[in-house]
Image (cartoon, coloured by chain):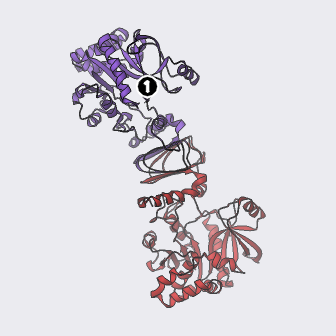
Chain colours: A red, B purple
Amino acid sequence: MQALILAGGSGTRFWPLSRRQRPKQLLALGDGGSLLRQTVERVRPAVEWGGVWISTTRELADIVARDLPEVPRERILAEPASRNTAPAIGWCLTMMPPELRDDVVAVLPADHRIGDGARFLEALGVAERAAREGGRIVTLGVRPAHPETGYGYLAFGEVLEASSGLRRVVRFIEKPDFETAERLVAGGDHLWNAGIFVFRGSRLLAELERLAPAIGDGLRRIAEDPEEGDVLYSALPSQSIDHAVMEKLEDLATVPLDCGWSDLGSWDALAAALPSDDAGNASRGDVLALDSAGCLFWAEQGQIAALGLQDLVVVRTGDAVLVAPRSRSQEVRRIVEALRERGRDDLL
Amino acid sequence: MQALILAGGSGTRFWPLSRRQRPKQLLALGDGGSLLRQTVERVRPAVEWGGVWISTTRELADIVARDLPEVPRERILAEPASRNTAPAIGWCLTMMPPELRDDVVAVLPADHRIGDGARFLEALGVAERAAREGGRIVTLGVRPAHPETGYGYLAFGEVLEASSGLRRVVRFIEKPDFETAERLVAGGDHLWNAGIFVFRGSRLLAELERLAPAIGDGLRRIAEDPEEGDVLYSALPSQSIDHAVMEKLEDLATVPLDCGWSDLGSWDALAAALPSDDAGNASRGDVLALDSAGCLFWAEQGQIAALGLQDLVVVRTGDAVLVAPRSRSQEVRRIVEALRERGRDDLL
């Protein structure tokens, strides 16, 4: 099996830890190395080093290569421009040698957390078999742990394979409001859309041509005229693989998965995923907290001393410190925007 | 007139900005240089450079000398041990040449804020005249601006001099509870004890011998046998000048003063003394605050980015950051104690 890791994100939600040259997927937010490295190591029992492909940006390609020296440099694919996941995945598939393009490819975001790697691999194996033997496109959907409003959901229908528990995906639901999320979770027939897909590369390319011809045709022309690649790629419509293909498929299958997954979409989500002390504080680095509860303290450099704090996130780097309520950590991007407006490139 | 500046404090309330080698009086908490330097410059219209004396510790003497190169090194007096203000003041007076010891001496804490320097000098002039011509011991008492529970109070009685408004001090009141403080302020006949005293040095030494003979006699023996100075000084009782002398005087006089005084006893007190923006935030250094109100942001090194904070103090140095509610900034010493227990000398 081939693994195509999507590592082109430029997220700002983990500022001040995340920077342009060090976006979320390159941060060591979990227990091991970078999230990217953890993602690769998680699939390694099912994928040879030679089967690892990284989709990233030109700005990040060298940094990714340093983070993953085991991956042959030519398999770190720097997209000519940012055009969302449908062009990115399609373009990487066209870059593969034809015989590998026909192999099963697992597409995995580089910046998520998976707590239970064994269960994940088990589900990945089911998906691989369904893709290899049944020609299916399969998504790993995560059994929802709570009525999360920050995720998209998948509604699943009938069992497609009794032996594997493979189900048909009948509908994609955008991020719901809280009441809807509660209903979806209570119903038991919805999964979180984790953005993990498994398919034969050749089938996905065929579906791109059928369901998103502007992208499919564009990729074909890039393959025929590589010198015009940058211009042609930049002209592709910016679409997610969900919108371009997955939502339109009538036979998308899913393997429900219960593996402690989180998209780590904010400091708050990270705090929820990290181990915490008796007072509910999650701490990294040199932290001294008195009379504080429910906080995330992250000291990359220097010390954080906290007294009498409740439900805050405090993140200290060598050049900045962020302090905000955990409940508002989605708004950290406003800080980044304000820094950009002020021309503070030194902090971006 | 001579000015004796008390600069031996080792306060921890401004951690992480204050350290053993850089206590509060050496911090630039106001608009100019260090609080010590501001204190000296404030009295300079009334005192020559040659009349400036600094009482400090051996640990701080060189640092003080660098901060005040204009002061002759031999007038920076490093007390042999920490024995509170009565021994410190008495010892400095005995170190002065006899003719200066008989001059008027103004004793001034090095780490307070005075907003209106002109009014302060005016009151100092009144006190000097009363000390020089009337042989009085005079304290500058501050008209209370609010019912502060963190200060001691002076009750004043009859007018001693109609021309100057000099009043007799009839009682010292320790830090009161809030109800008492409200009553004292409402009554109009109490002042904050600012620890500023003006007297002829020879009179103060005579009062020490009369009212605090253990200190007075000890100082006399040190003068007679300087080689035993360290041992003798360390054996002196640790007493404040208030307890040892001022509270026992029957003719202590005061000049009521209205000059924007604060003892800057905590981050909260400093925040109240600093100018603030429309949202009530006081900021120093590189600060970006969104949706925040009533906070003190102090960035000595690097940036502070704040989002959605209320009434917090955030202080960032090169090696630490403190985050606490302003209302709990008196408890910062608990952080310092905890660091000491953990052997974190690097942060003390």
Classify A57 as above or below A265.
below
Under mark 1, the amino acid is Asp
Classify B186 as above or below A238.
above
Q: Position of residue A225 (x, y in %)?
A: 48, 90
Classify A162 as above or below B345.
below
B159 or A140: nearer the eye?
B159
B189 or B251: nearer the eye?
B189
Location of the C terminus of chain B by quadrant is: top left
Q: Disc 1 on helix, strand or loop?
A: loop
Location of the N terminus of chain B by quadrant is: top left
A73 or A152: nearer the eye?
A152
Q: Position of residue B142 (x, y in %)?
A: 44, 23
Q: For this view, does A15 lie left or right of residue B129?
A: right
A234 or A148: nearer the eye?
A234
Residue beneath disc 1: B258
Q: Position of residue B68 (x, y in %)?
A: 27, 34
Q: How many marks?
A: 1
Q: Is residue B63 visible?
A: yes
The structure residue drawn at horizontal position 26% and vertical position 26%, both measured from the top left corner, is B52
The structure residue drawn at horizontal position 49% and vertical position 18%, both measured from the top left corner, is B190
Taking the view exactly as shown, the residue that stands out farthest to the front is B163
Q: For this view, does A238 lie left or right of residue B199?
A: right
Of all chains, the one bearing label 1 is B
Q: Is residue A300 visible?
A: no
Image quadrant where residue A247 sits = bottom right
